[in-house]
């Protein structure tokens, strides 16, 4: 089996593990990010992450925490296969000679390159996922205007294409790239740095699962710490109305978020994102490493 196919397979397994472990946290993150600003004198829809969990379960049951999972699950094979295979190919280009481990700096570069490629697949997938996850907020606006709320991923895609054409599926591409490129550079770089630190040198082939879990968790936390405000901007743009948009672009979204809520508005949902990042990314990397090793 060629290296590309091995990376495709292992990346798919890693992505599935990430979704299963992390999607409920992601749902709460998007709900907090996209909730509308309350009217003067009114309280926000969600008081915080725990309140968002309670309201979601009360209204939709536990399955509500997995709302929107269909879209990323349907494309997880393509997304993670692309991410890890492009990273693998960049490793081959950057490697000085066969079998030599990449330096931490080279892993940063490989991760950034993988992030560029992954952005074009991540954007429409994230848009559909976010619009489903934020559906309770969107439903209120839709009810006021007499518009039916989409029922699932395919229905969301149809509504988007109807309102904005196929290009509407790529709304938020700029902030998506602003998240994926530096985020993956940091994630893969920190993962390699942590592995080398735990291994006591550049040879990390004998690291145990516990060390891989720790390195993966640190890498995931580093991803969100480095790009979280960009993710907030991406989410609000992707759930924004197409016909009467509130935001004209990324910079306008930043200005309006800060004007309404201060800088802390750029960190809405940060708690669930960080709570998700450690177990979800640990699962991703461990599943990837196990699968890649099993394939030889």
Image (tube, rainbow, N blue to C red):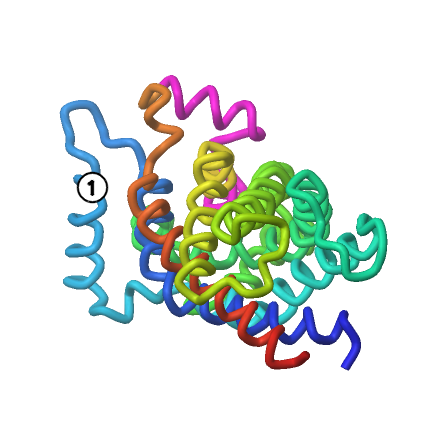
Q: Residue at x 42, y 52 (%)?
A: 217
Q: Position of residue 233 (x, y in %)?
A: 48, 35
In the image, is residue 270 above or below residue 52?
above
Q: Position of residue 48 (x, y in %)?
A: 20, 41
Q: Which residue is mark 1?
A: 48
Q: Residue at x 36, y 40 (%)?
A: 33
Left or right: 37 with respect to 202?
A: left
For residue 288, what is the image quadrant? Answer: bottom right
Q: Residue at x 76, y 70 (%)?
A: 4
Would residue 86 be seen by someone viewing this image from the given angle? Answer: yes
Quarter of the rendering occupied by the C terminus: bottom right
In the image, is residue 25 above or below residue 77?
above
Is 4 in front, or is 292?
A: 292
**Magenta-colored stretch includes residue 131:** no
* Crowd band around label 1 with a 10 angstrom C-alpha radius: few (<14), some (14–19), many (20+): some
Q: Position of residue 122 (x, y in %)?
A: 60, 54
Left or right: 295 with respect to 200?
A: right
**Magenta-colored stretch includes residue 238:** yes
Would residue 143 be seen by someone viewing this image from the given angle? Answer: no
Quarter of the rendering occupied by the N terminus: bottom right
Residue most extreme to the front: 200
Q: Report the label total.
A: 1
Q: Which residues are magenta?
A: 237-259
Q: Position of residue 18 (x, y in %)?
A: 45, 64
**In what element is the residue under mark 1?**
loop
Is 167 in front, or is 205?
A: 205
Is 25 in front, or is 68?
A: 25
Q: Residue at x 81, y 48 (%)?
A: 94
């Amino acid at each position: 089996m060629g290296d590309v196919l091995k990376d495709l397979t292992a990346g798919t397994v890693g992505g599935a593990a990430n979704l299963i472990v992390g999607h409920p946290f992601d749902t709460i993150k998007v709900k907090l990010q996209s909730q509308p600003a309350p009217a003067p004198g009114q309280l926000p829809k969600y008081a915080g992450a725990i309140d968002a969990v309670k309201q979601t379960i009360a209204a939709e049951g536990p399955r509500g925490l997995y709302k929107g999972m269909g879209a990323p699950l349907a494309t997880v094979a393509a997304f993670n296969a692309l991410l890890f295979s492009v990273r693998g190919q960049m490793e081959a280009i950057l490697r000085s000679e066969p079998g030599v481990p990449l330096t931490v700096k080279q892993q940063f570069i490989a991760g950034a390159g993988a992030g560029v490629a992954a952005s074009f697949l991540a954007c429409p997938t994230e848009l559909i996922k976010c619009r489903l996850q934020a559906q309770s907020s969107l439903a209120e606006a839709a009810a006021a205007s007499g518009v039916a709320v989409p029922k699932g991923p395919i229905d969301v895609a149809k509504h988007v294409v109807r309102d904005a054409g196929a290009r509407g599926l790529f709304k938020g591409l700029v902030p998506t790239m602003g998240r994926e490129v530096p985020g993956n550079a940091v994630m893969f770089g920190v993962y390699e740095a942590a592995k080398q630190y735990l291994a006591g040198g550049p040879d990390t082939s004998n690291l145990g699962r516990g060390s891989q879990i720790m390195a993966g968790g640190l890498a995931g936390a580093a991803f969100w710490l480095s790009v979280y405000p960009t993710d907030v901007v991406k989410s609000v743009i992707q759930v924004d109305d197409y016909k009467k948009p509130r935001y004209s672009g990324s910079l306008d979204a930043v200005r309006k978020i800060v004007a309404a809520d201060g800088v802390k508005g750029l960190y809405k949902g940060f708690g669930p994102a960080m709570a998700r990042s450690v177990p979800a990314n640990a699962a991703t990397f461990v599943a990837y490493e196990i699968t890649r090793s099993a394939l030889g």
